[in-house]
Amino acid sequence: MAEKVWFITGASRGFGKEWSTAALDRGDRVAATARDTSTLDDLVQAYGDRVLPLQLDVTDRAADFAAVQQAHRHFGRLDVVVNNAGYGQFGMIEEISEQEARAQFETNVFGALWVTQAALPLLRAQGSGHIVQVSSIGGISAFPNIGIYNASKWALEGMSQALAQEVASFGVRVTVVEPGGYSTDWGGASARHAAPLADYDDFREESQRQRAARQATPGDPTATRAAILEVVDADEPPLRVFFGSAPLGIATRDYESRLALWRAWEPVSVAAHGQS
């Protein structure tokens, strides 16, 4: 299989680190971005000049374009662009401040948008490429206490589904990866928490209990290495793919409930159309 060149945001930890390692282990090359490039030193030490460490805050649109261009100049092409940088904002909807809401979208939505826009002219010119958007089971379902995070991932999902249709004729593929719960620091060091309102304390405790029950055993992040390689190497990669054992069950219950509700209210929906 021909060597691939990857551009991965948020490569210093979590899935970004795992997938950078997977690509490098098999001989691919990686432009790895992080806010602090010292967090990429272990990759550079292990893989040498097959890694290009790039300092990047994805919320800076000009910096995104510059980083993508630098990676392309350095390696001569880009084959896989992974929008992995992101974080989880915790808090009930009423608790979320304007700054917290805007910051969540700046990273999880606009960061992915800017990197995608920066890469597309290069991918179209070479007639190939694969954009991988890291979403979540929270990108197709929604859960208490992470509503603004859900909103950001739903936005990413909609944008990516439209994008896939827009770029298919140029030989560019799009995949949205939707992980369940994993043993990463998504809910730990990288998470942010709104100031709590006491009125929600009982509900918050119950929602946390339910969240733990949905997947008592988190997934192993290293197991996603082989999975992401299978996705990017596929002749016909999926538009959407779950990572983890729990998401399909969650999605099935959620979508069956939606369909049942839409059908139950279909007479109202048809009446609302008016006369044809």
Image (cartoon, grey):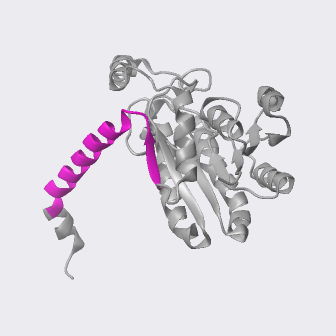
State the image quarter where residue 121 is shown.
bottom right
Magenta segment includes 265:
yes
Q: Where 28 falls versus 2 (above or below)?
A: above
Q: Residue at x 61, y 54 (%)?
A: 131
Magenta highlight: main SS: helix
- Residue 55, horizontal then vertical, whole percent: 81, 39
Q: Residue at x 58, y 26 (%)?
A: 192
In the rendered structure, which segment of residues is drawn in magenta?
239-266
Q: Where 23 falls versus 75 (above or below)?
A: above
- Residue 132, horizontal then vertical, whole percent: 58, 50
Q: Residue at x 57, y 51 (%)?
A: 232
Asked whether, in this view, residue 94 is left or right of residue 193, the answer is: left
Would you say residue 121 is visible in this rendering?
yes
Would you say residue 36 is visible in this rendering?
no
Q: Where 129 falls versus 186 (above or below)?
A: below
Magenta segment includes 99:
no
- Residue 153, horizontal then vertical, whole percent: 50, 45
Residue 153 vs residue 24, the one in the foreground: 24
State the image quarter where residue 216 is shown.
top left
Q: Residue at x 17, y 61 (%)?
A: 266
Asked whether, in this view, residue 78 is left or right of residue 202, the answer is: right
- Residue 42, horizontal then vertical, whole percent: 78, 26
Asked whether, in this view, residue 49 is left or right of residue 218, the answer is: right
